[in-house]
Image (tube, rainbow, N blue to C red):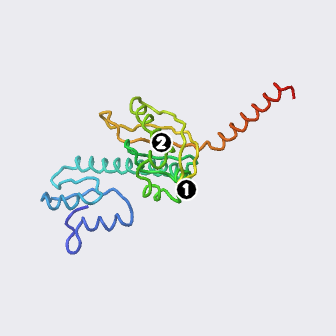
Amino acid sequence: MDIDLGKGIDGAQTAEIILKIREIPIVFLSSHTEPEIVEKIDKITSYGYVQKISNITVLNASIKMAFRLFEAKRQIIEIEQKHRAIFENAPLGIFRSTTEGEFIEVNSALSKMLGYDSPETVLREIHNIAEQVYVRSDDRQPIVEKQLQISGMTQHHNHYRRADGSEFFANLYLNTIKDETGQPLYFEGIVEDITERKQSEEMLNKTNERLLLATAAGI
């Protein structure tokens, strides 16, 4: 698309209208090189800018590149949508948090597990994971120290608190996301509520103890 389209709206304005209706790759072809013009089209989702003095080989390569970039963007969006669907619909609690202990993102399963009506409520209400989620606030620090010392995922078993003050047991699977220099950016975690399993194990242990005592007493 050219920048100059004669009387009326220009190419940049036309592109904005088109992109509101349908996402397509647009390459601008123009003789304009003024900074204000280049800045104007930079604000539009374009896939290239070719000067009219360029030969057909450059134009052809630019168009092919635009299609490749467009396809790559489409695939990235599809992957992100699939990951988002998994994140939002997973039966296990999933979260991202700062290394200092503040939630960045949580899914619906975790918000329900913690006794809140929505992920947005969790992010609004919980500002310190150790103080507000852990039954013993000092339980979190050893987990963080261990996680920062290794590469990969660690597993932990802990005692947590819901919004109403009730408690539950859960397995925590934690992983550290790092930048290109190896510096920690944030934690990603999965939380599995094992309260019912733990209660069943405790009941089974008590039953076994009673049977052993009865056996020892000759009953």
Circle 1: element type: loop
Tell me, for residue 207, which label it has, or none. none
Which image quadrant for residue 142? Answer: top left
Q: Decide which of 30, 38 is in the foreground and name it.
A: 38
Q: Image check: 143 left or right of 218?
A: left
Callout count: 2
Residue at the image position 27 percent from the left and 56 percent from the top: 27
Q: Image check: 128 left or right of 116?
A: left
Judging by the rendered image, the residue that carries numbered circle 2 is 189
Which residue in the rendered view is the most extreme toward the front? 217
Whether 215 is drawn above or below 95: the answer is: above
The amino acid type of the residue labelled 2 equals Gly
| Sequence-earlier tag: 2 or 1 | 1
Residue at the image position 23 percent from the left and 46 percent from the top: 57
Which image quadrant for residue 143? Answer: top left
Whether 24 is drawn above or below 144: the answer is: below
Residue 188 coordinates in the image, percent (x, y): 44, 42
Residue 85 coordinates in the image, percent (x, y): 51, 52
Judging by the rendered image, the residue that carries numbered circle 1 is 164
The amino acid type of the residue labelled 1 equals Asp
State the CA–CA distance, disc 2 to disc 1. Answer: 23 Å
